[in-house]
Image (tube, rainbow, N blue to C red):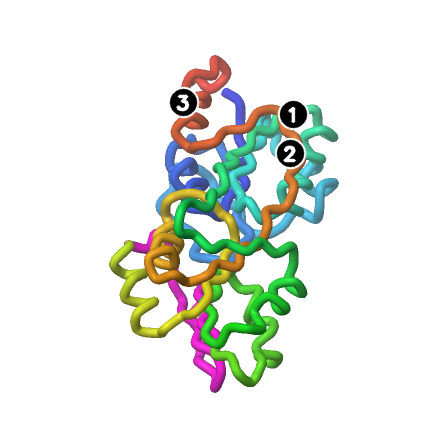
Amino acid sequence: MTRILLLGGTGDALRLARTLSADDIYSLAGLGTVPADLPCQVRVGGFGGADGLARFIEAERIGLLIDATHPYAAQISANAARAAALTARPCWALRRPAWEAGEGDDWREVDDWAALVAALQPFRRPFFTLGREPLAHLARIPAHQHWTIRCLQALPATEQARIIGARGPFALDQERLLFEQLGFDVLVSKNSGGRSTEPKLQVARERGVPVLMLRRPALPPVTRTFADLETLVQALASAPDRQP
């Protein structure tokens, strides 16, 4: 049976890992909680770029590489595509569609951190849902702003920042309460797609709060792409070389 190496770190990747066999490998960067109850093997840590990943694929006799990393993990996705090409292995990728602005939305796209900082100037109470990146800029918060940052790791608050440690999915009522209590006047988000973190966008629409949306990076072509987890799981189940 074809051995799979799954590159993960997202909720969809974890759900996919639960469908794998004992011979397959689920790879994590190690930034969050490492699950202990999976049927497959778990590997934590990097590979050393595309060349290191290619060596791992060859050494472990991986037959199929699956990239189920975050849509903004562009370097990992590039390494996966390159390693698959170097080893002549197929690479499948789970690439969920981006969110699209609808009626009542005020979305403003930015390309990078510098553009984001400039776009934030008129606001006082931004809500960051970008992961850990804002933590590197706590010493440079403008005097008129107080940041709320939601990421996986909770940290002590500072005079100008509140850091909330939480992992989605986030319920709509939960997001409404958070916006109400902390009085955000702008939401800062990646266009991650998916349902688990989408409620914050609905609340921003309801409250007339603008959204600064970090534009998605371009990702490399791979052997096969899937827009949703269910289709990928069905494809795996129907593959002749995945039958025991």
Q: Residue at x 38, y 61 (%)?
A: 208
Q: Nearer the viewer, mark 2 or mark 1?
A: 1
* Label 2, residues with CA under 10 Å away: few <14, some 14-19, many ≥20: many
Residue underneath mark 3: 234
Outermost residue, front direction? Answer: 103
Mark earlier in primary sequence (2, 1): 2
Does residue 215 lie above or below 154 as drawn? above
Depth check, front residue: 168 or 3: 168
Kind of residue at badge 1: Arg
Q: Is residue 157 magenta?
A: yes
Q: Which mark is residue 105?
A: none
On screen, residue 186 versus residue 86, left or right, reads: left
Kind of residue at badge 3: Gln
Q: Residue at x 37, y 48 (%)?
A: 196
Depth check, front residue: 134 or 88: 134
Describe the element under mark 3 as helix, strand or loop: helix
Measure the C-alpha gap from mark 2 to mark 1.
9 Å
Q: Residue at x 42, y 41 (%)?
A: 12
Residue underneath mark 2: 57
* Quadrant housing the C terminus: top left
> Start and end of the magenta stretch?
147-171
Main secondary structure found in the magenta portion: loop
- Please provide percent x and percent y for residue 122: 54, 73
Depth check, front residue: 119 or 153: 119
Q: Nearer the viewer, mark 3 or mark 2?
A: 3
Residue underneath mark 1: 89
Whether residue 122 is visible, yes or no, is yes
- Please provide percent x and percent y for residue 177: 27, 66
On screen, residue 105 versus residue 63, left or right, reads: left
Mark earlier in primary sequence (3, 1): 1
Kind of residue at badge 2: Ile
